[in-house]
Image (tube, helix red, strand yellow):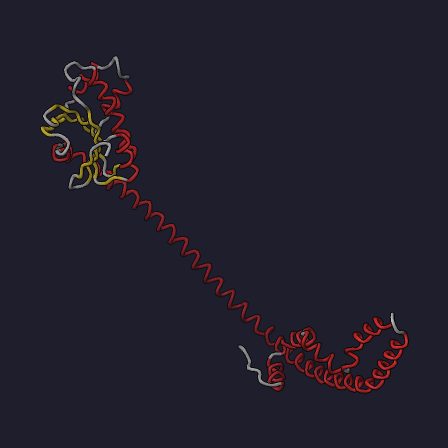
């Protein structure tokens, strides 16, 4: 806590209350250039302070007039002798002040030693309190570790539940599309029907010369292959359905649609029917939207069936 200082008496009182300030005060007193200059002015006469300058000027004058230098030196010597008594008196007064300060410092030292002894006595109690606190912290740490373990287990269970919920939502979406596909793609085509497995196999078999078995397998893995009419003309829809449409869903629909288009193109009965890639979901990521524009894939999103044409 700060102590207000208004006089030298306040300084001494503060030192008695705070013996640890003794060395700091003494160092500050001896290291302050302003205080040192004041002591110098009190110890030496003005003539003595200015004497180096006079000697310098006398040395400068010596080159032109040796007798003038001797006269100035004599005057300086006389002035020094006259001021000698005053200098020693000032030194004596300073010595007395230092002696009194030394006595005060000794008193402060005694008080400091007494305070240090009291601190040592209190040290044991302090360390005992720290030990008890450490034990409590250790117990709390154990409980925190147990709590973290429980939270981790809960997070694992929550993650499992989230995966299960997402899987259920995906299956429900596929079920809804299977039950009424036209409800989802009415903005793309009309008179929608699912291409039966046998029809799809016939198309793939007829195109075995232009598509590989791996490509045929990819087409079979489409979530839905639909047929209908768009602007009065036939059209196929290669559909991938997912709750949350990601970039991979878009790319998969585009790739499988391209394979199916290649198979349709070599079939004389279907050669002029286009194949449109479509993704259906409850939501879509930004990178998936960008991929849909790049790959010209139609998107049908949300309960309101927001439909975006491929490439837009």
Is residue 307 positioned above or below 150 on the image?
above
**Is residue 220 toward the left or the right of residue 5 in the image?**
left
Q: How many marks?
A: 0
Is residue 240 positioned above or below 23 on the image?
above
In front here: 293 or 126?
A: 293
Question: Image point 30% across, 37% down: which residue?
Answer: 287
Is residue 163 positioned above or below 265 on the image?
below
In front here: 27 or 16?
A: 27
- Res. 111 image quadrant: bottom right
In front here: 155 or 264?
A: 264
Place of residue 125 in the rendered image (x, y in percent of width and height, measured from the top left): 54, 71
**Is residue 88 toward the left or the right of residue 179 in the image?**
right
Question: Image point 18% across, 37% down: which residue?
Answer: 307
- Res. 244 image quadrant: top left
**Is residue 217 toward the left or the right of residue 23 in the image?**
left
Q: Is residue 171 visible?
A: no
Place of residue 41 in the rendered image (x, y in percent of width and height, measured from the top left): 73, 81
In front here: 278 or 142?
A: 278
Q: Quadrant of the C terminus?
A: top left
Place of residue 116 in the rendered image (x, y in percent of width and height, measured from the top left): 62, 75
Question: Image point 27% across, 37% down: which residue?
Answer: 289
The extreme top residue here reads 209
Q: Is residue 76 visible?
A: yes
């Amino acid at each position: 806590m700060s102590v207000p200082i208004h006089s030298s008496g306040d300084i001494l009182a503060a030192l008695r209350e705070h013996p640890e300030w003794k060395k700091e005060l003494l160092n500050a007193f001896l290291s302050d250039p302003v205080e040192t200059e004041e002591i110098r002015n009190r110890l030496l006469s003005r003539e003595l302070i200015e004497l180096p300058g006079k000697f310098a000027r006398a040395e400068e004058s010596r080159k032109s007039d040796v007798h003038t230098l001797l006269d100035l030196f004599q005057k300086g010597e006389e002035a020094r002798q006259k001021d000698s008594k005053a200098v020693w008196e000032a030194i004596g007064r300073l010595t007395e002040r230092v002696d009194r300060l030394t006595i005060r410092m000794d008193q402060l030292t005694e008080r400091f030693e007494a305070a240090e002894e009291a601190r040592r006595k209190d040290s044991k109690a302090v360390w005992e309190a720290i030990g008890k606190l450490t034990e409590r912290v250790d117990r709390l740490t154990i409980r925190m570790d147990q709590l973290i373990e429980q939270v981790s287990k809960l997070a694992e269970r929550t993650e499992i539940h989230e995966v299960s919920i997402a899987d259920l939502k995906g299956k429900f979406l596929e079920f809804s599309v299977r039950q009424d596909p036209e409800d989802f793609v009415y903005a793309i085509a009309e008179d929608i029907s699912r291409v039966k497995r046998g029809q799809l196999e016939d198309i793939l078999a007829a195109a075995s010369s232009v598509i590989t078995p791996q490509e045929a397998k990819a087409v079979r893995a489409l979530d839905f292959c639909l047929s209908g009419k768009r602007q009065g003309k036939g059209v196929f829809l290669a559909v991938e359905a997912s709750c949350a449409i990601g970039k991979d869903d878009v790319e998969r629909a585009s790739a499988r649609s391209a394979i199916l288009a290649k198979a349709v193109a070599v079939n004389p009965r279907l050669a002029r029917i286009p194949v449109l890639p479509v993704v259906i979901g409850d939501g879509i990521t930004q990178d998936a939207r960008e991929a849909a524009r790049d790959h010209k894939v139609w998107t049908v999103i949300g309960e309101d069936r927001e439909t975006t044409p491929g490439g837009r």
